[in-house]
Image (cartoon, grey):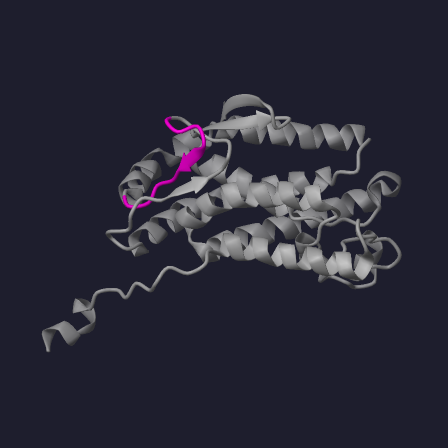
C-alpha cells in the first residue's frame, strides 16, 4: 500500500517521558542521601575519598572522579542551589537542543570544569588543593549555553533571595564570569571558582554546535505540541513567576535565530 512506503510514513511520536533534567536532579538527590548515610551530615570527603575530585586522586589514576564528583554535594544548601540552576536553565536547554545534547553539554562542562579545578589545585595546592564536589560546573555550562542561545532574554533574579534584579541573559553570564575570576584572584572562600569558569567556557565554546542542533531538534518536534512553561520562581516579562520557552513556534523562531546567530552571539 502507498501508506506503507518509507517516504509516506509519519514519524512516530512517543508518549511524554521524564526529562533528562528532572532525572538528573533525582540522581543527585539519591546520591546525596547515600552520602549522608555513609559519611554523616554534612558529608566529610577528606581522607582518600574515591569519588570526590582531588589532585591526589587523579595522580593515582582515579579519572572517574571527573564524572562522579558532579553528582555529589557538600550540604543541603549546596544541592538546592545547584538543583535550582539546573532546573531553570536545563529545561530550556533540553527543550531547545534535545535531551542528548543537553546531557552531553552538562557532563562535558562538568569534566572540563573539573580539569580546570584540578589544574588550579596542582598549581596552587594551598588554595585549591582540597577535594571538590558539586554539579555547579555543569550548571554554569547550562547558564552559558542559555546566554549564547538567548542573549537578549530578560530574567528577573532575587538577589539574596529578597531584592528583585532584572537583567539580560548575557549580562548574567558576564556577572557570573566576573565572580569566578574574582574568586580565583582573591581565593578566600571554599568555592570551586576554577570549575565554574571552566564550565562557562565550555558552554560558550560549544556555541558553534548549538545552531544546527537547535534546528534539527525543532524539525523533530511534534507539529502540534502545546506551549509549555517552566516554573522558575524568579523570571520574566509578562508573568513575574514564569519563564516561557519556545515550543510549537520553535521552528519558526529558530529559523530567524539562525539568520541572526552570528550577530547576536558576538554580543555575549
Which quadrant is the N terminus positioned in? bottom left
Q: Position of residue 244 (x, y in %)?
A: 38, 37
Q: In which quarter of the image is residue 126?
A: top right
Tell me residue 258's x, y (percent): 34, 39
**Residue closest to the eye, 72 or 138:** 72
Residue at far bottom of view: 1
Q: In the shown orientation, is residue 125 left or right of residue 171?
A: right
Q: Which residue is painted at 20% across and 68% down in the image? A: 9
> Where residue 15 appears, x then y in whole percent?
34, 63
Query: Magenta-highlighted stretch: main secondary structure?
Result: loop
Residue 226 shown left or right of residue 148 in the figure:
left
Name which residue lies at 77% across and 60% down: 37
User: Does residue 241 show up magenta in the picture?
Assistant: yes
Q: Quick check: can you spot residue 148?
A: yes
Residue span colored magenta: 238-248
Residue extending farthest left: 2
90 left or right of 261 in image: right
**Residue in view at x 50 percent, y 29 percent:** 170
Left or right: 34 with respect to 19? right
Numbered circles on residues, count: 0
Percent of width and height locating residue 118: 77, 48
Give above or below for 14 relative to 45: below
Q: In which quarter of the image is residue 160?
A: top right
Q: Is residue 268 at all visible to an observer of this figure?
A: no
Is-magenta flag for residue 178?
Answer: no
Amino acid at each position: 500500500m502507498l501508506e506503507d512506503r518509507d517516504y509516506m510514513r509519519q514519524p512516530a511520536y512517543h508518549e511524554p517521558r521524564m526529562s533528562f533534567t528532572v532525572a538528573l536532579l533525582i540522581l543527585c538527590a539519591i546520591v546525596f542521601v547515600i552520602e549522608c548515610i555513609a559519611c554523616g551530615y554534612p558529608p566529610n570527603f577528606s581522607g582518600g575519598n574515591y569519588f570526590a575530585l582531588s589532585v591526589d586522586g587523579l595522580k593515582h589514576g582515579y579519572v572517574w572522579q571527573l564524572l562522579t564528583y558532579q553528582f555529589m554535594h557538600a550540604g543541603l544548601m549546596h544541592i538546592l542551589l545547584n538543583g535550582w540552576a539546573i532546573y531553570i536553565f536545563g529545561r530550556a536547554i533540553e527543550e531547545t537542543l534535545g535531551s542528548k545534547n543537553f546531557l552531553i553539554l552538562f557532563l562535558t562542562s562538568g569534566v572540563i570544569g573539573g580539569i580546570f579545578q584540578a589544574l588550579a589545585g596542582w598549581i596552587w595546592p594551598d588554595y585549591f588543593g582540597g577535594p571538590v564536589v558539586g554539579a555547579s560546573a555543569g550548571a554554569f555550562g547550562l547558564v552559558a549555553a542559555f546566554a549564547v542561545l538567548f542573549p537578549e532574554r530578560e530574567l528577573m533574579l532575587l538577589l539574596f533571595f529578597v531584592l528583585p534584579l532584572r537583567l539580560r541573559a548575557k549580562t548574567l553570564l558576564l556577572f557570573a564570569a566576573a565572580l569566578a575570576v574574582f574568586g580565583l584572584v582573591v581565593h578566600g572562600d571554599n568555592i570551586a571558582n576554577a570549575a565554574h569558569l571552566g564550565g562557562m567556557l565550555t558552554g560558550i565554546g560549544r556555541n558553534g554546535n548549538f545552531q544546527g542542533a537547535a534546528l534539527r531538534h525543532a524539525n523533530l518536534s511534534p507539529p502540534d505540541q502545546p506551549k509549555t512553561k517552566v516554573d522558575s520562581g524568579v523570571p520574566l516579562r509578562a508573568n513575574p513567576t514564569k519563564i516561557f520557552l519556545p515550543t510549537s513556534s520553535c521552528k519558526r523562531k529558530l529559523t530567524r535565530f539562525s539568520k541572526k546567530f552570528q550577530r547576536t552571539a558576538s554580543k555575549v
